[in-house]
DNA sequence: GCCAACGTTGGC
DNA sequence: GCCAACGTTGGC
């Protein structure tokens, strides 16, 4: 199983909205690297839900329930989306400041490529972040 | 609200 | 194929 981190501005689409919806497409990605990450996702993969801009913290865990397919909101036909569902909220949100302050996470994609909205998470990073969030890995 | 970092576009 | 101009993201 692979792990990911997906960003959304909470005033665009928030964790609580996803919980209310129960399941949704992750659409709107317009960056090739992010798209390639979407395409690499498999059903059953897990992903952190990260609130960018406001909050700047990991707030929940999602599961990929459908692999990449064309994003109908993209007129060019170049970009895809996946379907996700919420798995569990974090007990303690993990803030960007905490992540940046942890020397074990210097290579974390969220730090290295701050503008990448769909990023891979390594197994050891996932375990560390789950521990920081107070949830089982 | 500002701006640095970064990605994309388009002229040449 | 290069690169300047421009647009966007997202932290601060």
Image (tube, coloured by chain):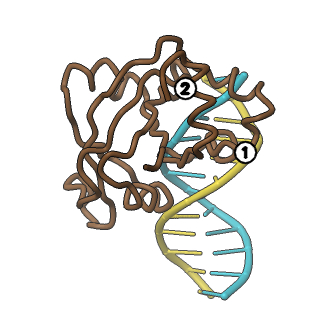
Chain colours: A brown, B yellow, C cyan
Q: Identify the mark at residue A38; answer none if there is no mark.
A: none
Residue A88 falls left or right of residue A126: left
Residue C10 falls left or right of residue A27: right
In which chain is the residue bearing label 2?
Answer: A
| x, y percent for residue A36 | 44, 62
| x, y percent for residue A55 | 52, 18
- Distance from disc 1 to disc 2, alpha carbons, whole Å, reads 17 Å
- Nearer to the camera, A13 or A106: A106
| x, y percent for residue A20 | 21, 19
Q: Residues within 10 Å of mark 2 (few under 14, many from 20)?
A: many
Q: Secondary structure at mark 2?
A: helix
In which chain is the residue bearing label 1?
Answer: A
Quadrant for residue A38, please give it.
bottom left
Disc nearest the viewer among 1 and 2: 2
**Residue under label 1:** A107
Residue farthest to the top, as pictured:
A91
Q: Identify the mark at residue A130; answer none if there is no mark.
A: 2
Quadrant for residue A61, please give it.
top left
Q: Residue at x 23, y 50 (%)?
A: A66
Q: Secondary structure at mark 1?
A: loop
Q: Residues within 10 Å of mark 1 (few under 14, many from 20)?
A: some
Q: Residue at x 24, y 60 (%)?
A: A69
Residue A54 falls left or right of residue C11: left
Q: Is residue A119 above or below residue C4?
A: above
Q: Earlier in the sequence, mark 1 or mark 2?
A: 1
- Nearer to the camera, A60 or C1: A60
Quadrant for residue A22, please give it.
top left
Q: Is residue A59 above or below residue A30?
A: above
């Amino acid at each position: 199983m692979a792990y990911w981190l997906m960003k959304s501005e909470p005033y665009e689409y928030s964790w609580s909205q996803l919980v209310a919806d129960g399941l949704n497409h992750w659409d709107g990605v317009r960056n090739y690297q992010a798209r390639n990450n979407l395409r690499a996702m498999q059903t059953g993969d897990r992903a952190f839900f990260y609130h960018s801009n406001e909050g700047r913290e990991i707030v929940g865990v999602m599961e990929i329930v459908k692999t990449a397919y064309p994003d109908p909101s993209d007129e060019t036909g170049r970009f895809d989306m996946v379907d996700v569902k919420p798995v569990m909220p974090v007990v303690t949100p993990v803030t960007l400041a905490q992540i940046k302050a942890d020397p074990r996470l210097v290579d974390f994609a969220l730090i290295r490529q701050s503008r990448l909205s769909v990023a891979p998470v390594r197994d050891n990073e996932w375990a560390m972040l789950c521990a920081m969030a107070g949830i089982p890995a």
